[in-house]
Image (spheres, rainbow, N blue to C red):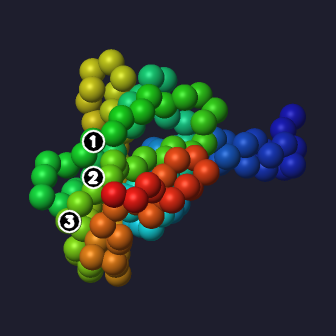
Amino acid sequence: MITRRSALLACLALAACGDDSKTPYLEFIGGGFIFNYRTADHYYGFVARRKKPLPEGAVLEASFEVPGGPNQVVRETSAEGKLQYTFQTGDLRGIEKGHPYKAVLRVLDGTSGAELARYEKTFTTEVDETSLPQGPLVVGPGYQQPAPQ
């Protein structure tokens, strides 16, 4: 005989097993432009956090809009248990202050390459490359001053 309490617990258990198809695989949790004044490098990127398990062998593909060229694409295969993924561009030139640069993160099937999910975010900066030094201020692992020319 089923008691009210048993029925209530069974309903709660079924509700906890709800369909998470509306939950995204990933979410952006940080990102932006980095201007390294010591080495005169600048780039941008983001960190994405996993919100639900990714399909086995899924490939994460980040595509970055960059000034004056084709998008830079970075790929990483998902790893079981990994909760965060970090993506960034290489060193950039021609960054414009206030311009929105679009980053697209796609989750791809590891076998077929089919797109399973897509997330977009724009990043802007209030600094452009004119505020960077023309060359590195320091070199090497100890940040030594460059030799005079």
The residues tagged by marks 2 and 3 sit, at their Cα atoms, a distance apart of 14 Å
Residue 55 x %, y %: 47, 29
Mark earlier in primary sequence (2, 3)? 2
Q: Residue 94 carries which label?
A: 3
> Which residue occupies 35% across, 72% down?
132
Circle 3: element type: loop
What residue did someone put label 2 on?
64
Of 58 and 42, nearer the camera is: 42
> Which residue occupies 36% across, 23% down?
110
Q: Residues within 10 Å of mark 2 (few under 14, many from 20)?
A: many
Q: Is residue 28 visible?
A: no
The residues tagged by marks 2 and 1 sit, at their Cα atoms, a distance apart of 6 Å
Amino acid type at circle 3 is Gly
What residue did someone put label 1 on?
73
Of 111 and 130, nearer the camera is: 130
For the C terminus, give its image quadrant: bottom left
Circle 1: element type: strand
Amino acid type at circle 2 is Phe
> Which residue occupies 45% across, 56% down?
146
Task: Assess whether mark 1 and mark 2 are in contact (beta carbons under 8 angstroms).
Answer: yes
Residue 1 x %, y %: 87, 34
